[in-house]
Image: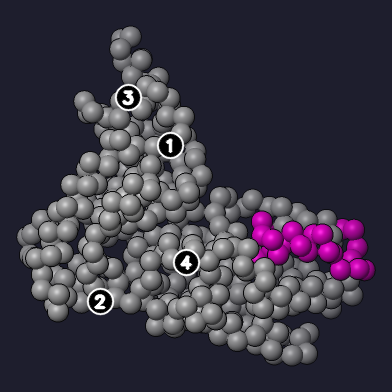
């Protein structure tokens, strides 16, 4: 009885805990070497397996980590995938043998926010790694011409609230997801257009400070804005955007926030009677990639190995890549799980 209570108390150090954009649930498996918990990536609502050693559990797991336990397993998996990678001629697509070895997929947790594949031997042909987008500093967004154009459109439409030229519910429908928790919203709060009633200003402030969607990327941190910046800067082509949005390793980091940002930005491209210029004249050519992003988010990404011809082989990560992670999560099953997508209306 005492041992059972001690074990339960120990696992409470890890279970039902929140860190970054992740939250753990109850323990599901216990072995001599460790404990396995389910771990949900909150903004994508995708669940993974988290394995923590008994020693780390006893230690209180003050900082989320499990590399001492999982890194040898990841190394073994990477070695096996490297063998599969080298066994196929370089001029042939990588297609797994029927009935061949199916290896678990591991992901490194980056900044307690994102997932980076560390054991896959394939990726969608033409896709860019999600972490490449993260190399674009969010601070760069604020000096990007599109951001200034977006700010001018926002302040123009917000000013129209003073004369009721735009009903507040229309303004809210167009802007709530773009100003909520973002630097765009904070700037609006600091520089509220003149003439707004106190009631309207209070309602705007309430939207800006809302946490309705929970944890996740702000507008300036989002993959949507980063894709737009990368495309405008000619770092990424339209075809690479299409391929990336069809890649499961890219889409596993696509959050509900990203979906809302994409829809809201696409809505701004629609002509409105109160705009003297066309939406593209307001927002500039950077906005031209938005329909491509919407199309990509309407579909599930390609599945491997079912759509193996759409994938290409990639070498396993090197030691420097693996050791940069202190926390690893594993895919919980060998079936394809759906990803967040937009729904056509």
Residue 8 horizontal/vertical position (percent): 36, 21
Q: What residue sits 30% from the left and 72% below the top?
A: 124
Residue 160 horizontal/vertical position (percent): 84, 76
Tell me the number on the disc at residue 72.
none
Residues at marks 2 and 1 touching, judged by CB atoms closer than 8 Å: no
Looking at the image, residue 21 lies above or below residue 155:
above
Q: Earlier in the sequence, mark 4 or mark 3?
A: 3
- Please provide the residue range marked out in magenta: 178-199
Q: Say which element carries label 3.
A: helix
Residue 91 horizontal/vertical position (percent): 14, 79
Q: What residue sits 34% from the left and 65% below the top?
A: 248
Write down the residue under mark 1.
64
Which tag is nearer the camera, tag 2 or tag 1?
A: 1
**Left or right relative to 202: residue 255:** left
Looking at the image, residue 335 lies above or below residue 247:
above
Tell me the number on the disc at residue 133.
4
Which tag is nearer the camera, tag 3 or tag 2?
A: 3
Q: Say which element carries label 1.
A: loop
Tell me the number on the disc at residue 55.
3
Q: What residue sits 24% from the left and 67% below the top?
A: 314
Q: Residues within 10 Å of mark 1 (few under 14, many from 20)?
A: some
Which quarter of the picture shows residue 129? bottom left
Q: Does 166 lie within the magenta span?
A: no
Quadrant occupied by the N terminus: top left
């Amino acid at each position: 009885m005492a041992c059972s209570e001690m074990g339960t108390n120990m696992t409470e150090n890890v279970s039902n805990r929140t860190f970054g954009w992740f939250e753990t649930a109850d323990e599901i498996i216990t072995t001599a070497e460790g404990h396995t918990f389910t771990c949900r990536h909150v903004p994508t609502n995708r669940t993974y397996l988290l394995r923590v050693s008994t020693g780390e559990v006893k230690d209180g797991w003050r900082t989320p980590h499990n590399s001492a336990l999982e890194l040898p397993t990841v190394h073994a998996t990477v070695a096996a995938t490297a063998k599969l990678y080298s066994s196929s001629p370089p001029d042939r697509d990588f297609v797994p043998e029927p009935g061949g070895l199916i290896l678990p997929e591991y992901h490194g947790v980056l900044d307690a926010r994102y997932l980076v594949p560390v054991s896959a031997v394939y990726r969608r042909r033409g896709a860019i790694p999600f972490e490449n987008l993260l190399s674009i500093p969010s601070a760069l967004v604020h000096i990007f011409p599109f951001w200034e154009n977006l700010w001018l459109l926002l302040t123009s439409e917000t000013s129209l609230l003073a004369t009721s030229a735009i009903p507040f519910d229309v303004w809210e429908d167009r802007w709530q997801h773009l100003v909520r928790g973002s630097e765009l919203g904070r700037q609006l709060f600091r520089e509220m257009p003149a003439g707004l009633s106190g009631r309207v200003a209070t309602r705007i402030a309430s939207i800006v400070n809302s946490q309705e969607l929970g944890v996740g990327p702000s507008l300036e941190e989002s993959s949507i804005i980063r894709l737009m910046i990368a495309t405008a800067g000619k770092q990424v082509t339209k075809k690479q955007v299409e391929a990336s949005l069809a890649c499961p390793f890219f889409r596993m980091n696509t959050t509900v926030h990203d979906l809302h940002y994409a829809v809201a930005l696409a809505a701004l491209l629609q002509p409105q009677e109160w705009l003297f210029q066309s939406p593209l004249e307001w927002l500039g050519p950077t906005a031209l990639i938005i329909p491509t992003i919407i199309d990509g988010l309407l579909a599930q990404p390609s599945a491997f190995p079912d759509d193996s011809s759409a994938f290409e082989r990639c070498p396993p990560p090197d030691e420097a890549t693996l050791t940069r992670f202190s926390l690893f999560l594993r895919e919980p099953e060998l079936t394809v799980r759906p990803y967040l997508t937009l729904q056509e209306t």
